[in-house]
Image (cartoon, rainbow, N blue to C red):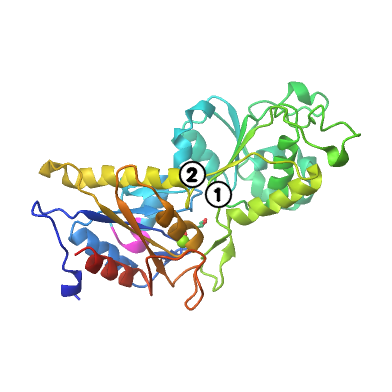
Amino acid sequence: QHRAFQTRVQSSGVPDYAFAFDIDGVLLRSSNPLPGAHEALTYLQRHRIPFILLTNGGGKSETERVSELSEKLNVELNVDMFVQSHTPFAEMHEYKDKTVLVVGGDYDKCQLVAKEHYGFQNVVTPGDLLCAYPDIWPFSKVFMDYYKSFAKPLPKPFNPANPAESLKIDAIFVYNDPRDWGLDSSILLDLLLSSQGHLGTLSKKNGDASLPNRGYQQDGQPALFYSNPDLWWASSHPLPRLGQGGFRVAFDGLWKSVTGGAKLEHTIFGKPYQPTYEFAERRLRAHWKALFEQVGLNDPLKRVYMVGDNPESDIRGANEYQSPHGSKWRSLLVQTGVYREGAVPSCEPTVIVKDVGEAVRWAVEDAK
Ligand code: G3P
Ligand code: MG
């Protein structure tokens, strides 16, 4: 076991490779640690081989998530080695003084992340809108006690009698998996068919009865950002569960029916996309530097091993990533999450391994 983990280090005593670990389906299933996860991470820490956690999950602050992960995996972690789906939203400064709708997650956790951790000044959630105007989506009245337990006053009232002068939403951020697809879809639809983002209005053209299915014309509607594309994710249920991508494709179906197939502008963050991997590599190199800066080396990081369970996010992202730093990423697909042993992965990894422990053993051998 120890021999298998004998690592090659440069004469300077630091490794020229590192790891990026996906979380759901690799280290955890829901909140239950997977076998070998603790041993794999603590081994790397003992041998000062850097790693980061790169997840399409989210829904709470980086600090809260990291302290939960440290406790569940019994491994010392910190936020400089952690990237989650909506972490890059914190750098979208052009929206900080605007009014934004934050969708998804439990209670008001994502609203607090946006406001208190990322600095967005005017944050509204679908729950706030439902509590202020229950008729906006009558079928969620049954959940009113839940929403009332955390709803906040709106930054500006929504006045159905004079909507053009009332609440205006400038951008929509889907932070995490929506819990109430009906309420969230209805509000997204209202805003994306509105005039200039004023809730309760219809764009002058969309309101034109002569257009089929209300039609759709660009009329200053809010920008739409999703934090990840995942159609499936590995919870503690034996079969994969629908993720945020499930909500997005369902909404795309609604949009097609309502508008007769108009193009819906939106931006999707997270794995497998290049910007996410660039963001992750910046975080990994900063973490590497913090670990070894006393050696005063320029950064020798040449290879990164991405360990994931989802061929469409973890594997495709690592395979297709073009590092601006010239590092080579190899993809290791585990059989403990979305990907099931024996299936043909939709994106071919460097190697298929049983679990995270075997992934680390394989990589350490490969790095020699
Ligand atoms: O919401 C979590 C899910 O989308 C996947 O998370 O950690 O497997 O990237 P992860
Ligand atoms: Mg996963």
Quadrant housing the C terminus: bottom left
Report helix, strand or loop for mark 1: loop
Can residue 2 be seen?
A: no
- Give the image quarter of residue 278: top left
Location of residue 121 with respect to 345 vertically, above or below: above
Using the image as rendered, state which of residue 322 and residue 41 is in the foreground.
Answer: 322
Q: Position of residue 103 (x, y in %)?
A: 61, 44
Task: Name, please, the residue furthest toward the left.
Answer: 11
Give the residue drawn at x 41%, y 57%. Answer: 319
The verdict on residue 298 being magenta is no
Q: Are marks 2 and 1 in contact (CB under 8 Å)?
A: yes
Can residue 13 be seen?
A: yes
Crowding at dot 1, Cα within 10 Å, few <14 / some 14-19 / many 20+, comes out as: many
Q: Position of residue 101 (x, y in %)?
A: 62, 36
- Give the image quarter of residue 219: top right
255 vs 55, left or right, is: right
Q: Which residue is mark 1?
A: 176
Type of amino acid under label 1: Asn
24 vs 42, left or right, is: right
Crowding at dot 2, Cα within 10 Å, few <14 / some 14-19 / many 20+, comes out as: many
What is the magenta range? 70-75
Using the image as rendered, state which of residue 47 and residue 32 is in the foreground.
Answer: 47
Q: Which residue is mark 2?
A: 86
Among numbered discs 2 and 1, the one appearing first in the sequence = 2
Type of amino acid under label 2: His
Using the image as rendered, state which of residue 311 and residue 234 is in the foreground.
Answer: 311
Quadrant housing the N terminus: bottom left
Label 1 CB-ligand 1 distance < 8 A: yes
The verdict on residue 74 being magenta is yes
Q: Main secondary structure of the magenta part?
A: helix
